[in-house]
Image: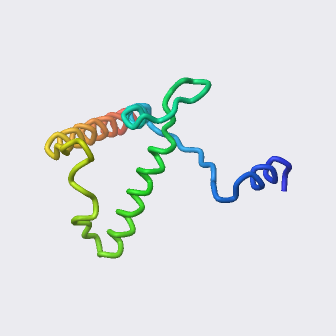
Amino acid sequence: MSKTQARVEGINQQVVRADLRIPVEMYAQLEAIANEQGMKKHHITGRPMVSPVILELLEIGLHHYSSQNRLGGDSTGLVPDTIPGKQLDIEALKAELLGQLREELVTLANSITEKK
């Protein structure tokens, strides 16, 4: 065991540090949520801390995932249709997701065409 590994393991054995690559657009959304929730600013960068937002979203995702697996894929009623203080616009969300999917398909098709 290296000195660094021993030092890190001795600090807190209840936490694992993970290297996570997040698209810039998604990170901007996380920062916006962190701002809305009044998260503390990082002492060097001055940007909002997004770790608590990521952890909350992971908890929601894990709960949804485990519930979906227990119920054989039916997740009806597990995730609320509203976000506190905001009404969830399903049609706008569908349009946004379809737009993102369309962009990814075009990018994929272009990369396949370029390889030929």
The part of the image, by quadrant, that contains residue 30 is top left
The answer to which image quadrant residue 77 occupies is bottom left
Q: Compared to 97, does 10 lie above or below?
A: below
> What's the residue at 46%, 46% (across, down)?
54
- Residue 94 vs residue 113, the one in the foreground: 94
Residue under the image location 75 percent in, 55 percent down = 9
Residue drawn at the location 60% of the way across and 48% of the way down = 18
- Residue at image position (32%, 34%) is 110
Q: Is residue 81 left or right of residue 27?
A: left
Residue 97 in percent (x, y) is at 24, 42
Tell me where residue 32 appears, x and y as whole percent.
38, 32
Q: Can residue 116 be seen from the camera position used here?
A: no
**Residue 51 in the image: x percent, y percent?**
51, 42
Residue found farthest to the left: 91
Residue 109's place in the image compared with 63, above or below, is above
Quadrant housing the N terminus: bottom right
